[in-house]
Amino acid sequence: MLLNPWMIPWTAPFGADPFAEFERELGRVFQGGREPELDVWTSENAVRVALRAPGYAPEAIDVTLDGDVLSLQGTRTARALAEGERWHGREREGERFARRVRLPFRVEQDRIAARYENGVLWVDLPRAEAERAKKITVHNPS
């Protein structure tokens, strides 16, 4: 039997989409910006996310969890000129970003922590207790 590769469901870590990179690049081209770089890694007890977003105010970054999808969004407004000022060069426009990550396991929503330091957003998502591996002791009946 010959398998059609297009009929096989494609999966990747964290629910990545095979066209996600292409979609991001299209967004970059048409919006004139670049999405912030995103790192996601896991340990036995947590998922950790680092998003490089220099120049954004912490209050302009929105972190939300909907089911197993973590959404990170931010807005940076362009600097307004004061009376009598004029631009001689301008490359830093206002920008927006939106990134979504499908988490590999359920997390403790009440214990999620986010901090922004040195231009990097750090999000720590502890693994839900029900998702953690449990050691089961084997007893000898005699």
Image (cartoon, grey):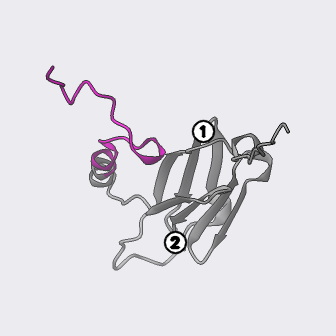
Along the line of sight, which residue is nearer the eye, 98 or 47?
47
Along the line of sight, which residue is nearer the eye, 17 or 11?
11
Most frequent secondary structure within the magenta stretch: loop
- In the image: residue 1, left or right of residue 78: left
Residue 54 colored magenta?
no
Residue 40: % across, % down: 51, 58
The boundaries of the magenta stretch are 1-24
Residue 10: % across, % down: 33, 35
Q: Which residue is mark 2?
A: 54
Element marked by disc 1: loop
* Position of 126 relative to 51 (above/below): above
Foreground mark, 2 or 1, reads: 1
- In the image: residue 61, left or right of residue 113: left
Residue 77: % across, % down: 53, 61
Residue 5 colored magenta?
yes
In percent of the image, x 55 and y 44: which residue is there?
104
Residue 61: % across, % down: 61, 57
Q: Which residue is mark 1?
A: 68
Position of the C terminus, as image quadrant, is top right
Tell me the kind of residue under disc 1: Asp
Along the line of sight, which residue is nearer the eye, 91 or 119?
119
Tell me the kind of residue under disc 2: Pro
In percent of the image, x 36 and y 60: which residue is there?
34
Q: In the current view of this chain or complex, which residue is farthest to the front?
A: 142
Please tell me how many numbered marks the rendered image carries.
2
In percent of the image, x 31 and y 50: which residue is there?
21
Element marked by disc 2: loop
